[in-house]
Image (spheres, rainbow, N blue to C red):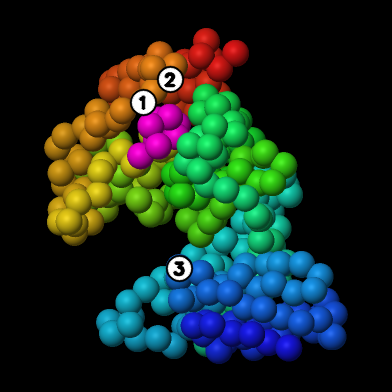
Amino acid sequence: MIRQSFTPQQIVESAIDFGAQIDPNTSINILPTRRGSAAVVATDVGQWLMKYADLTVDATEKGIEPARSVGIKNEAIHLGELPLSLGPQLLHISNTTTSVCTAIEYIAGASVHEITKGQAIKPYELVKNLIMSVSDLHESGILHGDIQPGNMLVDVNGKLRLLDFEFAHALDEQAIAPGLYQYLSPQAAGEIVQGHLLTLEEETFALTMSSLAILSGALPIARSSYTPSRHEMLLRLADKPHYTTFSVSEENIPLARDLIGVLESDQYSRPTSPQELMGAIAVHLL
């Protein structure tokens, strides 16, 4: 039995195909996500996240689909290389000349902001867990490429998990631009405008920004009714640092102060790895 709601027919077909491999008699419930090209598929024997992209879509008319297919395939490659403790498990990929569809382990849990607001886990504990997780990821030879609170959650066992590896790449590969400009250093913002590539150091900067965002419960740049283009925003960030608008609770002020100190330090003296960042703020994480 299939129940569908605002989901591409291709995901339905792929879900049926993949579900049949697990149990031909299982019922399938397909739930839409915020993206029309992804859905959570729930069955009698478990859940998984399915992502789909149509390679035949005209990019000039339809937008992101061709680029998204690259991200989906890239995520599948790197999830296949990761230890299970570092990211969701890749369960299935269907790759044809016209489309790509993946089935990925669905991780149930809550966002880091939901966790900190509910006081289930102290923010500084999440910061420590995040830095350790990214450090382990780098030790496995992979950069995430889009470190930010929206790409992580705390699972039902209280473990912080990294998600959305569409921008991931090997440490020895050239990096592509990450998804959110709010987590870039001013230097990287200028480099991206000029067409330059990102580095391991920039992932550490994004990790520092994300740690500060976890403490404050807010994005580095507040949302507004006016949203400038990415190019305009990158030019603005390249001209002026953008990490001084945080408000944190009194108990987190010492840690937040040191994180801001890291961000405001000279680009040549900032931590260049999660291990160096941990060393810079270790006194607050004991």
Q: Quadrant of residue 141?
A: top right
Front-lying residue, 195 or 25: 25
Q: How many marks?
A: 3
What is the distance, in whole Å, between disc 1 and disc 2 at their CAs? 6 Å
x then y, percent, for residue 183: 35, 41
Q: Which mark is residue 248?
A: 1
Q: Position of residue 83 (x, y in %)?
A: 73, 47
Residue marked by disc 3: 34
Tell me what residue is drawn at x 61 percent, y 70 percent.
40
Q: Amino acid at mark 2?
A: Asn
Q: Is residue 6 visible?
A: yes
Q: Is residue 160 left or right of residue 38?
A: right
Helix, strand or loop status at disc 2: helix
Q: Is residue 204 left or right of residue 169?
A: left
Residue 79 in the image: state x and y as whole percent: 65, 57
What residue is rendered at 25% in x and 49% in y?
A: 223
Magenta-highlighted residues = 211-218
- Residue named by callout 2: 252
Q: At numbered mark 1, what does the secondary structure look like: helix, strand or loop?
A: loop
Task: Confirm or deny contact between disc 1 and disc 2 (CB under 8 A).
Answer: yes
